[in-house]
Image: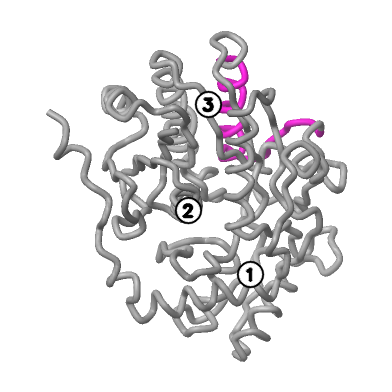
């Protein structure tokens, strides 16, 4: 079945493309390359350079390739930035998702998988957080994603499009076959930043807040390896294709690690005792986000293979070393440019 992957030249979307191709699926990537990379899209996937909010372009893609399913990753994801620039996040994450969804409904796309976030829960009182927890996001990023969830649920009821909403906790690591990893130079993800610091690409690593009500005062997060995460999407797609009901699932391992624990793991794996600086809390950060994972395991039969902090940290570090030595430059732009094939 032809699958359109928005944001498929980026970190998670790029791993999704690899997993779909490994499975033998036909893949079309739509990405504006604002944070993604041409070389991250391998053959035989088709690369379309454009915006998910461009309804005319999206409609043409769906019709040209007879798209059966959309997996929607394209989004703005930096929490502090969302606090400083909220309208940009409502445009990028909510308005453009509405446009994409309208195209999907009008063109009768059957299946829609949405990349959501644990940020929709805000400061959830329960630990771990189940899918039935109150939805009370504390930052514009989480709110922009929750609004998109609501639109998708309403469209499913009104128009019959089948959907899965996957709420990510903290995604980390790289493809175990070393084909791809997190490649943006200005990423804010803790494990990538720690890898860059260990390699001397940053002078120090900052811990944002050590006064949280947690075991060591730093934030607690549920880190899920990126290949495990995209495998959950494959299972969700198969589930919907097989007649499964609309679904909302957490994507995490069900246990949390503190910022200090992650930093210590990177120091141990890299052998570098890099500098760590204490800074104040960042706006919009929650103290602890850990997933309840019973639903994804029971309904989709998800069995993660990479639930190991040392392995995740090692993958991230090895990919950062490859970036440092410009290894990805040897990857040609293998996806065809869509605008060259359409009138």
Circle nearer the viewer, 3 or 1: 3
- SS of the residue at dot 3? strand
The residue singled out by tag 2 in the image is: 22
User: In terms of depth relative to the viewer, which is nearer, 93 or 250?
Assistant: 250
Residue drawn at 82 percent across, 69 percent down:
216
**Residue located at (79% from left, 46% from top):** 293
**Residue that label 3 marks:** 111
Q: Nearer the viewer, residue 248 or 336?
A: 336
Check if residue 53 falls in the magenta segment.
no
The residue nearer to you, when weighing 33 against 331, is 331
Q: Quadrant of the N terminus?
A: top left
Residue range highlighted in magenta: 133-155
Mark 2 or mark 1, which has the lower sequence index? 2
Q: Residue furthest top?
A: 158
What quarter of the picture does the C terminus occupy? Answer: top left
Q: Are marks 3 and 1 in contact (CB under 8 Å)?
A: no
Q: CA distance from mark 2 to mark 3?
A: 20 Å
- Residue that badge 1 annotates: 312
Determine the main secondary structure of the stretch shown in magenta.
helix
**On the image, which quarter does residue 298 sit in?**
top right
* Residue 259 x %, y %: 71, 68
10 Å neighbourhood of mark 3: few (<14), some, or many (≥20)? Answer: many
Query: Badge 1: how crowded within 10 Å, few (<14), some, or many (20+)?
Result: many
């Amino acid at each position: 079945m032809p699958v359109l992957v928005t944001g498929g030249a980026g970190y998670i979307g790029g791993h999704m493309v690899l997993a779909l191709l490994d499975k033998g699926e036909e893949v079309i990537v739509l990405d504006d390359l604002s944070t993604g990379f041409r070389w991250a899209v391998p053959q035989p996937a088709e690369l379309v350079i454009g915006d998910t909010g461009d309804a005319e372009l999206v409609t043409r893609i769906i019709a040209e390739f007879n798209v059966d399913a959309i997996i929607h990753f394209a989004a703005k994801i930096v929490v502090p930035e969302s606090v400083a620039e909220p309208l940009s996040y409502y445009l990028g994450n909510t308005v453009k998702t509405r446009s994409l969804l309208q195209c999907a409904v009008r063109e009768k796309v059957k299946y829609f998988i949405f990349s959501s976030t644990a940020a929709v829960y805000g400061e959830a009182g329960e630990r771990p957080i189940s899918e039935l927890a109150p939805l009370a996001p504390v930052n514009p990023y989480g709110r922009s994603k929750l609004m998109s969830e609501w639109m998708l649920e309403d469209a499913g009821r009104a128009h019959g499009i089948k959907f899965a909403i996957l709420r990510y906790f903290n995604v980390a690591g790289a493809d175990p076959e070393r084909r791809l990893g997190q490649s943006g130079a200005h990423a804010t993800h803790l494990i990538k930043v720690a890898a860059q610091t260990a390699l001397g690409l940053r002078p120090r690593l900052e811990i944002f807040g050590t006064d949280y009500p947690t075991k060591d005062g730093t934030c607690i997060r549920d880190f899920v390896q990126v290949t495990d995460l995209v495998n959950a999407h494959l299972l969700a797609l198969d589930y919907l294709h097989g007649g499964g009901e609309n679904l909302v699932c957490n994507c995490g391992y069900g246990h949390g690690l503190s910022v200090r624990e992650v930093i210590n793991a990177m120091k141990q794996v890299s052998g570098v005792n890099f500098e760590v600086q204490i800074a104040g809390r960042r706006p919009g950060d929650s103290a602890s986000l850990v997933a309840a994972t019973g639903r994804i395991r029971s309904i989709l039969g998800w069995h993660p293979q990479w639930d190991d902090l040392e392995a995740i940290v090692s993958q991230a570090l090895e990919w950062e070393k490859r970036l440092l030595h410009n290894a990805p430059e040897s990857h040609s732009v293998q996806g065809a440019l869509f605008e060259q094939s359409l009138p």
